[in-house]
Amino acid sequence: MSAEIYFSREITPEKILELYKMLEKDLPGKVAVKLHSGEKGNQNFLGPDLWKPVIEHVKGTVVECNTAYEGERNTTEKHRRVMEEHGWSRHFEVDILDAEGPDIELSIPEGKKIFKNYVGKNIEKYDSMLVLSHFKGHPMGGYGGALKQLSIGVASSFGKAYIHGAGVPEHIWTADHDSFLESMADAAGSIVHYFKGNLVYINVMKNMSVDCDCCAVAEDPCIGDIGILAGTDPVAIDQACMDLLYSCSDPGKSHLLERIESRNGIHTIEAAEGLGYGTRTYHLTEIE
């Protein structure tokens, strides 16, 4: 079975909502909207104005989780301040899932590298999730997209260290690299299963730097904008972004691809497909 992915080269708030509606996928109950709040100082993250129509349409609550490294989002107090400065809490209801402990432990019996995932206890308030991802590079994962949002993005501060360390939080920066990538795939699958498939994914290929929105000091984008993708399969939507990147004619793609390939970024997608909660086979429908 192939996944259906909708794609538009036009990047506007209205087009994001249009693609979402084309999926005809109802998100039941209380909807968590997972996005990246943007590290203080980062110039590339996608802000509230771009996402506002789709968030309002699903009547969603913007959710985030504290980081596992030093910065302006590693404590609840600091993270809430950034959410205010970046406009999130001025426009939407905001919930930091791991604002207070204890974390919830999700079992991953089929995991390749990790067999549990740690997420903030506030996740229990939600019945479904809209995953809004900024597709770009990443210093460790090679790239960031839907799978990273589901894994590192939804994990608590402790959970992030656990994934990075492939089950050993103390090895957060020193674990075997492919084991880290496989741990991300494991953790992402636990969120898909937690919400029983009640998820929708939107990836926006805009402001694509080799660096993540978690970097306070990030390189400027090295490649022109490509477009918006929407789907219900996190593996397919990330694979489609990869394929669009490889096939584009922008010479700046070589810099971004070097970052992705040098970190073996495609391995997260491979590992996720191997776990069975998504497919790399898709049908891309372009919308004018």
Image: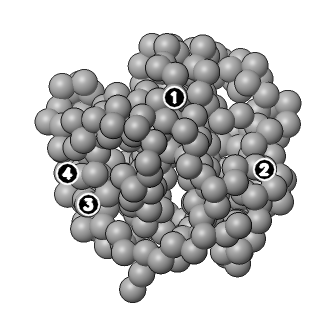
Work out whether 151 lies above or below 29.
above
Q: Secondary structure at mark 4?
A: loop
Residue type beneath disc 1: Pro
* Image point (52%, 15%), residue name: 216
Q: Mark 4 to mark 3: distance in Å?
A: 14 Å
| Residue 44 image point, x, y percent | 59, 27
Query: Which residue is labeled 3 in the image?
Result: 270
| Residue 120 image point, x, y percent | 53, 41
Does label 2 or label 4 sit earlier along the sequence? 2
Query: Which residue is labeled 2 in the image?
Result: 13
Q: Which quadrant would residue 107 be assigned to in this image?
A: bottom left
Work out whether 79 lies above or below 274.
above
Looking at the image, which residue sits at the far bottom?
Answer: 1
Residue type beneath disc 2: Pro
Q: Secondary structure at mark 2?
A: helix
Looking at the image, which residue sits at the far left?
Answer: 176
Does label 4 or label 1 sit earlier along the sequence? 4
* Image point (79%, 28%), residue name: 87
Does label 1 or label 2 sit earlier along the sequence? 2
Query: Which residue is labeled 1 in the image?
Result: 221
Callout in the foreground (4, 3): 3
Is any part of residue 6 visible from this angle?
yes
Q: Which mark is residue 113?
A: 4
**Tag 1: Cα neighbours inside 10 Å, few (<14), some, or many (≥20)?**
many
